[in-house]
Amino acid sequence: MTLHPSKPGTLTSALLLCLAAVGASPVAGGVRDSYPLNQGDWKEYRSAYGTDRHSFAQASFAGRKLLEESHSLTGSRMYLQHSGAQLVWYGGRVGEATLTFDRSLVLLEDQMLPTGGSRTSATTVKFEGVTFTLNLTVTVTVGGTVTVPAGTYQDCRLMRFELTASAMGEEETAAVDVMYLAPGIGRVKSAIVDEDFEVIGWEELVAGSVAGKPVQRKVPTITTNSPLPGGTVGATYSATFEATGGTPPYTWTKVTGDLPPGLSLDSGPGTIRGTPRVAGTFTVRVRVTDADAPFAGKEFALTINPADRPKTSMKVTTSGQ
């Protein structure tokens, strides 16, 4: 998220600076290889307010070896660290304000990016000699397609931050949809907010390199439509997913939901096959991953109908006829 110039010396200003600082990180976690963060990465974003180049390098902060993210447009720097499946934000510099958390702020945990959900972290930060207590709730919404100058990305994640800051008997809260994350890329679109926490624009990814690969590389797109062809209890079933783009070969996996009992997904060809045993409508989310690791996901409905009842006939005869 980018900070639009705000009014200095107020709780609102401090809150906005903190929210901007936290939102400035290319948040990753859960599926680390799918939302990467690496030394030597760089990304360029453009908006009505100019071009901002984000670059990443190893650095030291608060006695720790961390990954430093620097922004050319604002001059801000953030310090981040992967810890298992978590991303930890230690502090940084936003304009002329230096924000140093007394303890680390965990932004994401294991299952948030794959399945969505919310997490809350609390910490304190000093700003202009005043210590603020911060409570940050990060909410991840699964799904969605985002188009930016660098390309069109499927199965993105929308992140929403709700931050409450309190100090000297005052308390203020901000809630903003701050960014969209794309698989294999990280942040592709982020909000620009003013001093009233209103979104006044967006900055969008136009170029960059992640893990030595350009962000403009093609990602797979699932072309199969939902719902899938229906089936019948007791009858052999087969349906194959299709995708384009990316770098074949593809691997197909079930992410959430359940297939009808009796059916399974073959990860190679992406074929659901078997003999269904139970009637009903089932919802399943599948993911296709290409040879370079970018992936896309999509939700499908599949209806299994009851078995057809055999028709019977009866002949009645009467004696003497």
Image: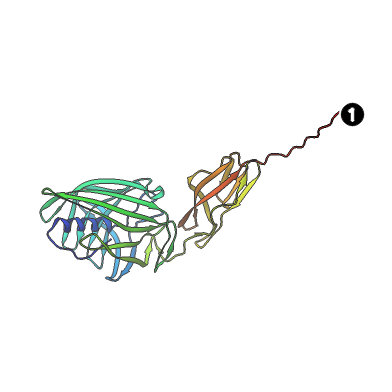
**Is residue 67 visible to the viewer in this orientation of the structure?**
no
Which is nearer the eye, 157 or 88? 157
Q: Which residue is drawn at 21% across and 58% down?
A: 16
Q: How many marks?
A: 1
Determine whether 271 is above or below 77 in the image: above
Q: Quick one: SS at disc 1?
A: loop
Q: Where is residue 22 in the image (x, y as percent from the top left)?
A: 25, 55
In which quadrant of the rendered image does the N terminus lie?
A: bottom left
Which is nearer the eye, 252 or 320? 320
| Residue that label 1 marks | 320
Q: Where is residue 70 in the image (x, y as percent from the top left)?
A: 26, 62
In which quadrant of the rendered image does the C terminus lie?
A: top right
Task: Determine whether, in the image, residue 4 is placed left or right of residue 116.
Answer: left
Which is nearer the eye, 158 or 183? 158
Taking the view exactly as shown, the residue that stands out farthest to the top is 319
Task: Determine whether, in the image, residue 51 is placed left or right of residue 143.
Answer: left
Task: Determine whether, in the image, residue 267 is placed left or right of residue 180.
Answer: right
